[in-house]
Structures are given as C-alpha cells and as structure tokens.
Amino acid sequence: MPHNTPYVSVVVFSYNQKSSLKRALESVFAQSYRNIQIVISDDFSTDGSREYLKSLEGKFGKIIKLVFQERNVGIASNKTSGLKAADGDLITYLDGDDFYFPDKIKLEVQQFLKDESLDVVYSNFAYTEKEGDINQVWAKDDWNPIVGYIFPEVFLRKFPKKSLYRCELIRKEVLERINFYDLNLKTFEDWDSRIRMTSFANVGYSNYIGSAYVNDINGISKTSSKQSLLLDMIYVVQKNRGIILFNSSITKEVKKFEASLFYDLATLSTGFNRYIYFTKSILKNPLNLIKIIVKLIIVPTEYIKNKIQFYTS
C-alpha cells in the first residue's frame, strides 16, 4: 500500500434504485480524496439503472468498473461479487440509496496513515429521509468511540441506538480472510461480517459524519417478516459460537441476548413453534420462565415489533 495515497475502492451496491443511485455516485465523485476506483455491483436491475451505469463507464473510463449479475442473486451475493472485483488496497462501500459526505474517505485514510496497525476504520453517520434531509445523527458529540478490539461490542450491538457503524473502510486482506459475506443470509449479513472481522481486527474511528443512511420503507429489513429477521439474528449468533469460546467474558451476555431473541420469536409465533421457542429461551436463560409466565398472554405483539426496529434501523 503506497504510504501517502493508498488506492481506495468504493463498492456501490445497486438494485432498482436509478433515481437515488445518481445521488449516491455523485457523492462518491465529489470525494476530496481522489485516488479511488468505483465498482458498481448491480443485482439485475430492470429500471434503467444499467443503461445509466453503462453511460458512466463510457464517460469516466478506468475509474469505473461494472459488475452486472445475470439474474437477481440477493444482497449478500451481490455485495460479495462487488467486493471481490475491487482492486484497491482499502475498500469501502455504499448502498445505492445512501450517500457520502465529501471528506469521508480522506479522513478515514488519514487514520490508517496515522496508525498502520489498523485494519478497519469507521465514521459517524446521519439518518435521512429520501429527500436527503438529516433528521438525526448516529453518535452524539459526547459519545466515547469504541476502538481497538471491539468484538464484544459488535457481537452484542453495544453501539448508539443498538445499530452498528456503516460504510467502514477495510483493508482488502481482511475481507479476503473472512471470505466476504455469508450467502445464506438474507438480512444481517453486515452484522455477521463485522463479527468475524472484529474477532481479529484492530479498529479505528474517524470523528466525522461520513455518510447518510436513507430510511427506505421498502428496504429488505423493513419489508421482511419480523420472524425471518429474528431467525437470521439467531443464525448469526449460533454460527459464530466458536468465536465466543475465546471471549468467555461475554458468554453470559450472549446467552441472555440469544434467550431474548428466542423469547421475541416465540411471542410472534403460534402453535408448536411457540412452545419450542419459549423452551429454547428458558434453556438459554432460566429467569425467562418467570417472564414467560407473567407476560405470555399480556405482552402485545406490537411491543416485540417495536423492539426489533432497534436492530433494523
């Protein structure tokens, strides 16, 4: 990696987002850091996005690399294809409906140059509506950034609003080491990849609002059933159980967290499945037996739905 200006790949993920995709790409072109490659991985869009992207390729040449899926392959597979195509020493990414602020990449690269032991650097971000107006910021000014070995906090989602960082800048070899995304996941693929990354990575922070996350009511985390979201979360916890063995300090917290997921899933389920999930919740945390007896009937489903919103925002 060149000492002063490492080559950075920005991987943009696209699927039927032509109108917002233009804004996303314009925010990448407007970056104050100039030594970049833009990879756009499109998941078989049918809204004219591909024609627009081809016109950019002709206009900007080598700075643009297009990855077109031949069929709709889903989020995790499309993301993996784009990341594998990236040539940069450092790689970051952007969903097609989100956007960057001008100094995002420059300030994150500066953190890498200050500390060559870093593997990942993340920034603050803003929440916006489709129009782009900021309505809140992820981390407040008085938040104490979590840096260094942050696996426990990532696994247990101990970040502002129980929501993890976004659009981090990552060394290419880190992504290769974790083999990118888990193709079995329809949601929470980012959480899973960060769990695996932070099990060994040294993580830094840039105190800058680097990107904007657009609240899309049609996004997969908003349109998926609450049951399927919980099942994906449980899958992530269980598949990474081996990493927890080397982090015994959080074993009890993980069991409580997993028990709460099974409890919420049971509350949303019916018939035999409800009994099974309540039983698993009790086995993970026996104290949940009291909770189940007291709230089995009176807990409104809406309470569980609102709770899940913490994890999908």
Image (cartoon, rainbow, N blue to C red):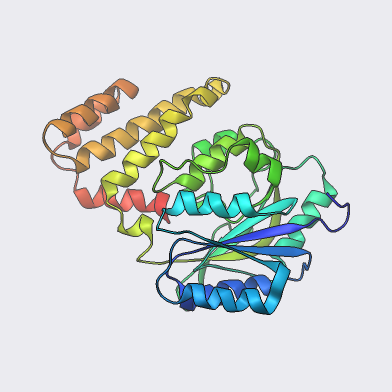
Res. 42 in view: yes
How many numbered marks does the figure carry?
Answer: 0
Q: Quadrant of the C terminus?
A: bottom left
Residue 22, how many percent across, how many down? 55, 77
Q: Nearer the viewer, residue 205 or 15?
A: 15
State the residue at coordinates (43%, 68%). 45
Determine whether 183 is above or below 134 in the image.
above
Query: Going by the image, does 79 lie left or right of 225?
Result: right
Determine whether 297 is above or below 144 in the image.
above
State the residue at coordinates (16%, 29%). 275
- Place residue 30 in its image quadrant: bottom right
Q: Residue furthest front?
A: 70
Residue 250, how many percent across, how many down? 52, 26
Residue 272, how many percent across, how many down? 13, 31
Q: Nearer the viewer, residue 312 or 193?
A: 193
- Place residue 257 in its image quadrant: top left
Res. 132 in view: no
Determine whether 46 is above or below 192 in the image.
below
Residue 78, how many percent across, how many down? 49, 54
State the residue at coordinates (88%, 56%). 4
- Place residue 223 in its image quadrant: bottom left
Query: Going by the image, does 159 lie left or right of 219?
Result: right
Q: Residue furthest left?
A: 271
State the residue at coordinates (54%, 37%). 195
